[in-house]
Amino acid sequence: MKILVINAGSSSLKYQLIDMETEEMLAKGVCERIGIDGIISGSTADGRKFKYEVELKDHTAAFNEVNKNLISGECKVIDDISEISAVGHRIVQGGALFKESVLVTEEVIAGIESLIDLAPLHNAAHIQGINACRSVFGTELPEVVVFDNAFHSTMPPEAYIFPIPYEYYEKYKVRRYGFHGTSHRFVSARCAEVMGKDLKDIKLITCHLGNGSSITAIKDGKVIDTSMGLTPLDGFIMGTRCGGVDPSAIVYVQKKEGWTPEQTSEIINKKSGCLGISGISSDDRDLAAAEAAGNERAALARSIQRYQVRKFIGSYVAAMDGVDAIVFTGGIGENTTDLRADVCNHLTYLGVKIDEAVNEKLRKGAEGEISTPDSKVRVFVLPTNEELLIARDTRDIVEKLNK
């Protein structure tokens, strides 16, 4: 069985074709600048690559290019599109409507559409992706939607209810939903597997650290809390997002600067975080280089990030009354060895000890344990694979459908 995994954005479409017999990626790529002009690039598992400019007036045009590159040209990996058994779509916001992955139906599309206000850029684009997929591949090809926040649906009310007038939860469903759920679900399952334990028998903190970052507490196999909130803005400092900030600070500056709600959203989502503090970049690699060159604001941005990661880990240890393992994943979590060392070296009160030499080696997709044998809490670096998790869910649902 071959599964095509799709992540549609407002002006982009990422894809991977995965052979579920081996769970290996056959081809991947991205269509960019949809509705503007168009660039598509991609590669195959055996190292073939392509990149070219082409008019992409909409997502249907992008799907046609994906189709073409999968079945023809120097980078073809299948002979016919009929070899694809199903399509799995990443959906950012499932709200309280969807607590698990489901087969696409007209009712499901309507449900995703009803949640656009909670994720206006993402959910609208996902619907475009689903409709474009149907237009190109037909409605007979099964499609499955995998929701980014579904893993977090087990949170108790004390974790997801915001302390604002309850009527806004009742009227508008304003609450904590959490995101990066596919990543947290993948690495938590993998951590339990590596430890040789059932996920239900361990207390786990998973740290997805990248340009967007979130931390999740998992107890008895269920999420009990996560750092992102109604949107991916909440939590701690990220590449361009501010994370948790005293709301009155935002209101105060908003009044002083005369920002509209749209301008305020632009500032706190796209111009804050590490970019806002450093004034240089949202990319940790740029900040690390600047810090090494003596840039104090770059150093401050990285220091804030580490401090806040430590705070969230500590609070989740308290929430779960202990922790058995901590996982680092995501672009920064998997590659930034000095961040991992800094965080772990400030968790000595938990009995955390790491092997500095092993920590330095684990990067660029390497998996392993960085804690020492006498560490009271085990610490792992586990590369995430959200596309594979989406493909697995898609396969499972399609196989049930065919029974």
Image (tube, rainbow, N blue to C red):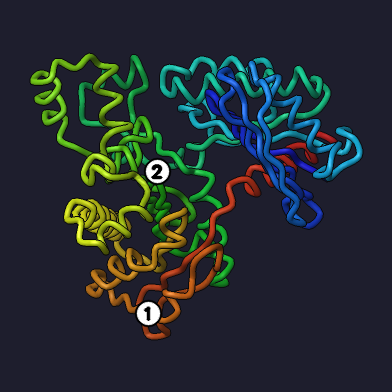
Observer able to see residue 358: yes
Specify the label residue 356 is tagged with: 1
Point out residue 122 in the picture as x, y percentages from the top left corner.
Answer: 49, 26
Residue 330 in the image: above or below residue 231: below
Q: Residue at x 38, y 53 (%)?
A: 217
Q: Decide which of 132, 282 is in the foreground and name it.
A: 282
Dot 1 lies on which element? helix
The answer to whether the residue labelled 1 contacts the one labelled 2, judged by CB atoms less than 8 Å apart, is no
Quadrant of image for the N terminus: top right
Residue 182 in the image: above or below residue 290: above
Mark 2: which amino acid?
A: Gly
Q: Quadrant of residue 192?
A: bottom right
Observer able to see residue 315: no
Specify the label residue 212 is tagged with: 2
Point out residue 34 in the picture as x, y percentages from the top left corner.
Answer: 59, 23
Point out residue 110 in the picture as x, y percentages from the top left corner.
Answer: 59, 14
Q: Decide which of 186, 17 is in the foreground and name it.
A: 17
Query: Callout 1: 10 Å neighbours few (<14), some, many (20+)?
Result: some
